[in-house]
Every structure is written in C-alpha cells, then in structure tokens.
Image: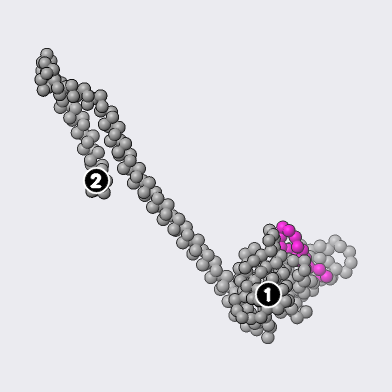
Amino acid sequence: MLDRLRSHRHVLVLMVLIAIPVGLLSLSPDDKGVGRSTSTIGGVARQGLGWLKTGEHRVLAGFGDLWERWTTDDLERDNEQLRQKVARLREEKSRLIGVLQENARLRELLEFKRRHSEYELASAEVVGREISSYFRVLTLKLKSTAELESGMPVVVAQGVVGQIQRTYGSFADVVIVSDPRSRIDAVSQRNRAHGIVQGLGHERHYRAKISYLRRRDRVEQGDVMVTSGMGGVFPPELIIGTIQQVDTQKRGLFQEAVLEPAVDFSRLEEVFVITDTS
C-alpha cells in the first residue's frame, strides 16, 4: 500500500493543492450574504472559513514536509545504492588491474625461461624487504622443492637482481645489485670494456659504481653492462644496467662510472633463482 502511494505521490499532492483553494473559494462570503445573521449555516461556514484561512499555511507546510520526507527518503535510498555500486565497481577494478599486472609479469618470466632453456630456474616470490626506504636485502620464498645455496644468482626478465646471501629452508635472503657487498664481474655490450659492478649503498637511490675500468677503454653514457661469466657465479650476457655517468677526472690507470640497474627493485614480486647452468 505504501509503495502504491509513493508511486502516485505527485498526483495526490497535486489534487490536495488544487482542492484546498477551490474549497476555500466555495466557502467565501458574497454580497448577497451582507446583513444576514451569523447564526445561519452560511455564517457558521464563514466562521469556519476564518479558521481555515488562519491554518492554511500550516496545512500547506504540513504537505510540504510530507513531500520533502517522501522525496528525501527516496534520494537517500538511491544514493546509498549508488555508493554501494561504486564501491563494488572500484573493488572489481582493483582486482582486475592486479590480475592483469600479475599476468604481464608472469608472461615476461615465462618468456625469459623459454629464451634461456640452458638454465635450471627455480621460481620464488618476494615475501620481505629490508626495513628502509631503499632496501638492500630481499627475502624470497621458493615455490618449488629445489635446494637453495648461498651465492646463487637471482634474476628477472629485465636483468640481474642479486645473489643469495643465506638460506633457511625454503626461504633465502638476497643481496641486490645496489648493496655495497655485491660485486659482479661485468663487460660493456658495446666494446667489451671490463669492470666490477659494486653497489653504492646510497640511501636515496639504487645505483652502483663500476670500478677497475681501464682508462683506455672508452665507455660512454648509455652503454649497457652485462655479466661477463667470469668467476663462475653469474652466467654471461645477463643485463646488469646502463651507464649513467663516467668519471675520468681521477688520475691513474682506471676510471669509474655510475650504473643504473636494469631492474626496478621497488616493484619486484616474482623472481627466478638460477640453480644450475647446463
């Protein structure tokens, strides 16, 4: 019943608003009534008319309040439904974006695995980071039954992440490229200039330095440095990063360069551990 009244509320209000002035006009006195006694029916009606006129604004105000209450209730209910719908859509969008990003990362890892079938790769997820703005150590959780050992390389499709520092069960701590304890034998892709990539350990960025670059080897900004394969730790030709700056001011046989790692360490979620290079 209430729903039916709500659905016809515009018509009902309009009828009432029309009926009130019409009724008042029908009861209003005319010239023929002048001089007649107020004890007649017309006099009683005119007295009632006075009361009606006095309370007319109250009646209209009451209908106004009723109208406002009906419309406000509907608006609040509609707004609440819209808020709930928007919240659901935002949650679904967030989940969809996460799934798409995860699929993109997994596709890159699978493509890396396909290109490097000569490696034994164990997948792992990043489950922890050193507590600092620019961490230097990652904690991994292995997704397979492979055995981890200290010194094993950790990589992603973009390039070198670092080396396992220590293991405990299916977990491992990894020292990344920007850590001062990390040292990787590297060569330039362009001219095979040789150097050692060592983390700077800077608190505001992930950069590393390249030491022991011979002064006669002309390295330039933009040169890509890759693993040399020497030392038996990292297999050759894995990308480490790009030279950002070359310092030729120091005297001696060597020059130094600053390297920007190829990997965005702040976004790592899944990695590969190279357990063997057959």
How many numbered circles does the render carry?
Answer: 2
Q: Is residue 154 visible?
A: no
Using the rendered view, name the quadrant where residue 112 is placed: bottom right
Magenta residues?
198-213
Q: Tag 1: residue type?
A: Tyr
Q: Is residue 8 left or right of residue 157?
A: left
Q: Is residue 86 left or right of residue 74?
A: right
Where 65 falls versus 109 (above or below)?
A: above
Q: Earlier in the sequence, mark 1 or mark 2?
A: 2
**Could you give the CA–CA distance between mark 1 and mark 2, rounded to whole angstroms?**
72 Å
Using the rendered view, name the quadrant where residue 105 is placed: bottom right
Q: Is residue 91 left or right of residue 55?
A: right
Q: Residue at x 39, y 49 (%)?
A: 79
Name the colouring of the figure: one colour
State the mark number for residue 220: none
Q: Residues within 10 Å of mark 1 (few under 14, many from 20)?
A: few
**Residue 114 percent coordinates (x, y):** 59, 80
Nearest to the eye among marks 1 and 2: give it.
Answer: 1
Q: Is residue 34 visible?
A: yes
Q: Look at mark 1 in the image and give the residue it sits on.
A: 168
State the mark number for residue 5: 2
Q: Residues within 10 Å of mark 2 (few under 14, many from 20)?
A: few
Residue 200 is covered by the magenta coloring: yes
Mark 2 lies on a secondary structure that is: helix
Q: Tag 2: residue type?
A: Leu
Foreground residue, 214 or 127? 127
Mark 1 lies on a secondary structure that is: strand
**Residue 30 percent coordinates (x, y):** 14, 20
Foreground residue, 53 or 242? 53
Q: Residue at x 45, y 55 (%)?
A: 87
